[in-house]
Amino acid sequence: MTLTDTVPAAPTRLPSKRTVLMCRPDYFTVVYRINPWMDPALPTDTSLAVQQWQVLYDTYVGLGFDVKLVDPIDGLPDMVYAANGGFVLDGIAYGASFTHPERQPEGPAYMTWFGDNGFDVRVPKNINEGEGDFLLVGDVILAGTGFRSASDSHTEMAEIYGRDVITLELVNPSFYHLDTAVAVLDPAPGYENPNIAYLPSAFSAASLAILEERYPDAIIVTETDAAVLGLNSFSDGYNVVIASRAVDFERQLRERGYNPIGVDLSELLLGGGGVKCCTLELRS
Ligand code: ARG
């Protein structure tokens, strides 16, 4: 018997073109602390942040993505984390309403961009931090709560989009947004058996049980990979842009037939964000 008889071939993965919104980190720095990754006493290098972010931007363009840009605003250093600017599906942009006062002006700034760019904007009634806590997996929306988005926003979302919204409770302050603890691997709606990767210890026991039941084939990442925000990644269904330091996650993705592409966003990690945080998907 040869090895090929025993090891099933990884399935063929098909990329699909994505449209995303990003924000150049021209004003990025760390001057307040709203998550455990942030330490205002540590120096930041804004030009290095811009250079690293540019590599992510160029990677997306190279993958054929349509990348839109929102203008950064002086005094809003976290605006680079575009994922938090809202959630966009079926041409409807559900605006963000931030937990911390430091980020609150970002909500209207992103809503203005959505309105100017033809999206049907819904002003949120409840605290929520956009795609940081809302992830579309196939036809359902996984929704995080515990640190940032209020669970009432999950109900509001379900009403707006008419889809199932699955509440998941986060319990580790280092993984305060859902997109730091779950990676969506097969993002296109209508995909059969869409898969995810996640960090089990980031969830309450009840939420972990939901993930185990819904995604029996999920990739389970190591604490080490999660600690470099390896899960904070962006997939087009084949290419998965990840933190270059998440080496075991990279191996697991390859084994499953995905094409991991590592990028180094070490400077933006000082603000507690990675690849996905810098990326807001626009679904028309
Ligand atoms: N400093 C930002 C905050 O704490 C980082 C946001 C990261 N974004 C994300 N989608 N996880 O709000």
Image (cartoon, rainbow, N blue to C red):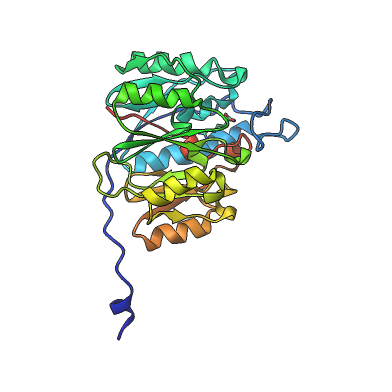
Q: For the point 46% across and 30% down, which residue is it? A: 83
**Quadrant location of the C terminus?**
top left
Q: Check the picture and name the quadrant holding the N terminus.
A: bottom left
Q: Looking at the image, can residue 3 be seen?
A: yes
Q: Quadrant of residue 229?
A: top right
Residue at 33% x, 22% y: name it: 159
Name the residue at 60% across, 48% down.
Answer: 227
Q: Nearer the viewer, residue 117 or 185?
A: 185
Query: What residue occupies the far bottom of the structure in this picture?
Result: 1
Name the residue nearer the viewer: 216 or 199.
Answer: 216
Which percent across, then down, holds residue 102?
62, 19
Q: How many labels were placed on the picture?
A: 0
Q: Who's the residue at 65% across and 38% down the image?
A: 37
**Residue 232 visible in image:** no
User: Which image quadrant shows ligand 1?
Assistant: top right
Q: Position of residue 240 (x, y in %)?
A: 40, 49
Is residue 93 toward the left or the right of residue 125 in the image?
left
The location of residue 153, given as percent across then percent down, is: 44, 23
46 in relation to 152, above or below:
below
